[in-house]
Image: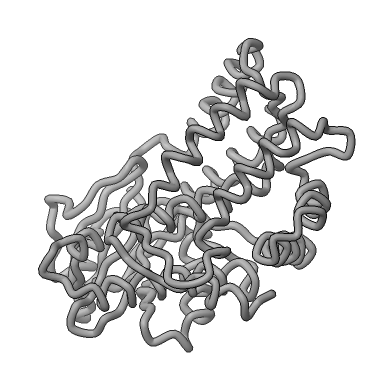
Amino acid sequence: REYGKGWQERFAHFEMEPVAAASIGQVHRVTKNNGRELALKVQYPGVARSIDSDVNNLAALLRRIDFLPVSLDVEAIAKEAKRQLRLEADYVAEAKHLAHFRKLVSDMPEVLVPGVDRELSTRRVLALDWIDGEPLEHLCGEAVAQTRRNEVARSLYALMFRELFEFRFMQTDPNFANYLYQSDTGRIVLLDFGSTTYFTKAFTERYARISRALIDRDEGATRRYAEEIGYLRPNDSPEHAERVLKVIRLACEPICHRGVYDFGASDLIGRARDDGIEMLLNSQGEFKAPPPETVFLHRKLVGSFLACARIQARVRVLDLISVYL
């Protein structure tokens, strides 16, 4: 339907059986008549049309959940969710993001972003260069050298900090399935740019300031910058403020660690979960959900940590962020 009648004539080969599937589409391996091998990402019918109604239904449900010990800015969160989901369903936008990101990382030989075939890409079909590689989870095997795991994790964190502080443009879905690894070249292949976001200079500067304060263990500055970002309010009680700051300190533990951070041995996720639950239960009436623009940044931060923990990497994260502070 996207290509019209005679669409088969565009291809020398088309594998009808998908090689991968996700929540909104599936991927087919194809070869164009000119010999170019491509991954054709085809969106399921009706996905884009259902976004607004699905998010509105969820927002209506959240408005009725008045027993939660948290004040949710439902309208702002729903607006940001719709924006992100519309982008994920718009393959023309994703193609632009891919091309833009490909240029941004052109000076990073350890990172590879596939090229886009503009001729075959539409709003519902995305055609990318086919790139061979292994799933990132193959690095979890005991046969993989620790140094190799460390290199990959270091590249992931170095890239994330460039995205936040330098590019101010971030791929915000660090799902394992969105990466490949080329063992022969040592390169990480980035596959999916449906979920992306831009940051203002003011926003990234605020994150740089709170990161510096956390590293310096400056409690007063950390509290001040937490208010500046919107995690706290000036009239919050000292007890609530300390609970929020404790969670912030936990979330930033890898960047504040002086030395090599052992992701595989860390119990950070469990501690952060427990303290987060305690904060919600004991700060009823005071807790305010983080600003909507931080939601997808948090997903990137958590996802990157989980990826590095899964491959049991060890990295001096402080060294990587310090150049931006």
In the rendered image, which quarter contains the C terminus?
A: bottom right
Q: Write the residue at 55% across / 50% down.
A: 251
- The reply to whether residue 223 is in sight is yes
Q: Write the residue at 75% across / 31% down.
A: 239
> Residue 47: where, in percent of width, then height?
42, 37
Of residues 319 and 81, the one drawn nearer to the viewer in this rendering: 319
- The reply to whether residue 199 is in sight is no
Q: Write the residue at 63% across / 43% down.
A: 246
Judge from the rendering whether residue 272 lies leftward or rightward of residue 25; answer left or right: right
Farthest residue toward the right? 235
> Residue 18: where, in percent of width, then height?
17, 51
Judge from the rendering whether residue 162 lies leftward or rightward of residue 140; answer left or right: right
Judge from the rendering whether residue 188 lies leftward or rightward of residue 271; answer left or right: left
> How many labels sit on residues?
0
Q: Write the residue at 63% across / 11% down.
A: 67
> Residue 313: where, in percent of width, then height?
32, 66
> Residue 173: where, in percent of width, then height?
45, 53
Q: Quadrant of residue 41?
A: bottom left
Of residues 36 and 286, the one drawn nearer to the viewer in this rendering: 286
Of residues 52 and 293, the one drawn nearer to the viewer in this rendering: 293
